[in-house]
Amino acid sequence: MVSRVIPVDDFDLVIFGATGDLAHRKILPGLFRRFVAGQIPQTSQIIGAARTDQDDQAFRDQAGKAISEFAGVKKNDPRLAQFLELLGYTPIDAKGEGGWKELKSRMRDGAVHAFYFSVAPSLFGDIAERLAGHGIADEDSRIVVEKPFGRDLESARALNATLAQHFQEQQIYRIDHYLGKETVQNLMAVRFANILFEPLWNAQYVDHIQITVAETVGVAGRGSYYDKSGAIRDMVQNHMMQLLCLIAMEPPYHFDPDAVRDEKLKVIRALEPVAPNDIVRGQYQPDGDEPGYIEDCENPDSRTESYVAMKVRISNWRWQGTPIYLRTGKKLRARTSEIAITFKEPPHSIFDDTGAPKANELVIRLQPNEGMNLKVMIKEPGPGGMRLVQVPLDMSFADALGAEGQDMPDAYERLIMDVIRGNQTLFMRGDEVEAAWAWTDPIINAWEDSKQAPEPYDAGSSGPDEALRLMHRDNRRWREIRS
Ligand code: BG6
C-alpha cells in the first residue's frame, strides 16, 4: 500500500508557549514527522513565541533536543537540521506590547497564517486581542486552542465570547487530540463505510455499549492541575464525550465539518442527566512505596476522582433503552482504550439441548493494538451433537494494513495539517463544547454539594468494587481491563 501524502500550502505557524511541554512533546515532533513525510513545504515558517528571551538559534537547539527525544530521531540526522531551518523565535509579552511588532514583521503575505495557543486559557483573550490589534491576524488566519476549554459552562461561554470578539467560528480550531487518533476516525469508517453494522446499530439490536479509557499512569507531576479537574473534567467532558458522539450519532449527510458536528451536537443534547446512583468515583491508594492519589496531588482532603464510571442514557429514537457505560481512570491494571458493543441475544435458539447462543460483541480497540474483534458463535468441532462455541474474528489494523499500519501518525500530526488545510471536521465547535459542559456541570455540582468520599481502589486494579456493582445491578459485567 502506498502512503499518499498531499503537501499543504506554504504556511507561517506561530506557536505561543513554544518553550512549554506540549510544544516539546507533541507539536514540534509532530511537525517534524510531517516534514519528513514531505507534507510541509520547505519555505514554511514555524515561529516560536514565548516569554523566554532567546534568539532563533537557541530555540532551534531547544527544539532539536525535544524532537530527538520525543520523535525518536538521532540528533545528527540531516533531516532534523533541514527541519530546524524552518524554525524562528520571537520573545513575546502576552499581556504587554513587547515583541508583537517583531512578530508581525516575520509574517509573509500569501502564506497561510496559523496561531497555536499552547498557553494557559487565561492568556487566550490577551493574545487574541494583540493579534487582531497589531494587524497580525486577519480574516483568513486560524487560531488553535487547547483543552481545557473552560472548567464549566460559564467559563467556556466566556472563553468563546472572548475569542469571538476577534475571530469568526470558522477560524477557531478547538483541539481534542482524541479526534486526531487514527482509530478514533476509524469509528466513522467502520460505521459509515460498511453496510454490515449500521442496520443493527440501534436499541433494537444493541444491548449496551461500554467505553473504556484506562491508564496506568498516575497524576504525579501534574497533581495540582489534576486535583482541580478530576476525571470528569479531564477525560469525560471532552475525550470520552467525543467517542460517545462518534459511536452514537446519526450518519452525517457528508464528511464535512458542520455536517459531522451538527450530528455530534444532537447526541450531546439528547444525553439524560446522570442520577447520583449511576455514577461511581474512585481514588487510587498507595501501593508499597508508590504514592496514592492523595500523596500525588499533595492535598490530604482531596475528594477529586482519579477514576469514574457511569451509566449514560441517550434520549432519542435510536438509543432509547440502550445504556452506555463509560469508565476512565488512572493507575489501572493496563493502558487500554476500547469501545465494546454488545448485541442482544438471538430471539430464539433452535439449539436448545446444547446451550443458547451468546450475544455477539464487537470490540473496537483504540489503543494499543488497534483493531477490531467480533465475537461470533460457531459449532464446536467434533461428533456428538451440536455444541456451540464463541470465537473471535480478530483483526489487528497493523497486520491488515502492512507497513503503513505499523506507523500510525500521532494525533497532533493530523490535526495541525488539518488546520493548515482549513478543515475543521476534527475540531470541536463552540456550541458542542458548551453543550458538553451543560451536561457535565450538574454531575460535578451534585458531587461538590454532597459529602460523599470517593471509593478507594488499589493501584493496578480495575477500579473500585462499587463500579463492578454498577454493572452487576443491571445483570451485566465490565470487560476485563487488559492490554
Ligand atoms: C489528556 C489528559 O487530555 O489525555 C490526561 O489531560 C490523559 O490526563 C491524556 O492522560 C490521555 O491521552 P492519551 O492520548 O494518552 O490516551
Image (spheres, rainbow, N blue to C red):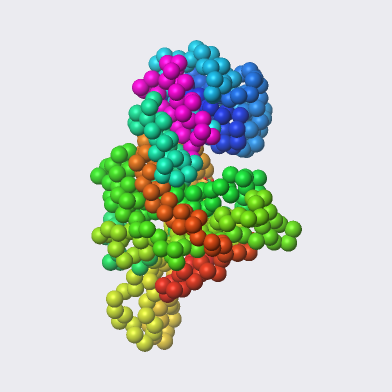
Q: Is residue 168 magenta?
A: no
Observer able to see residue 427:
no
Q: Nearer the viewer, residue 139 or 295?
A: 295
Q: Nearer the viewer, residue 95 or 432?
A: 95
323 is higher (above) or lower (below) than 268: below
Dividing the image into 4 quarters, which one contains the N terminus?
top left
Q: Residue at x 35, y 51 (%)?
A: 268
Is residue 131 in the magenta section? yes
Where's residue 437, x and y in %?
A: 41, 47
Classify residue 48 as left or right of residue 192.
right
Q: To which quarter of the image does residue 216 belong?
A: bottom right
In the image, residue 65 above or below residue 282: above
Q: Residue at x 60, y 36 (%)?
A: 21
Residue drawn at x 32%, y 47% is 265
Q: Indicate the position of residue 3 as horizontal and vertical percent values.
A: 44, 38
Quarter assignment of residue 22 = top right
Q: Is residue 206 left or right of residue 405?
A: left
Q: Position of residue 366 (x, y in %)?
A: 47, 52
Work out whether residue 455 can be spotted: yes
- Is 301 in front, or is 312? 301
Drawn side of residue 199 relative to residue 379, left or right: left
x and y percentages locating residue 460 in the rendered image: 63, 62
What span is in magenta? 120-147
Quarter of the image containing the C terminus? Answer: bottom right
Q: Nearer the viewer, residue 331 or 369?
A: 331
Residue appearing at x 39%, y 39% in the figure: 157
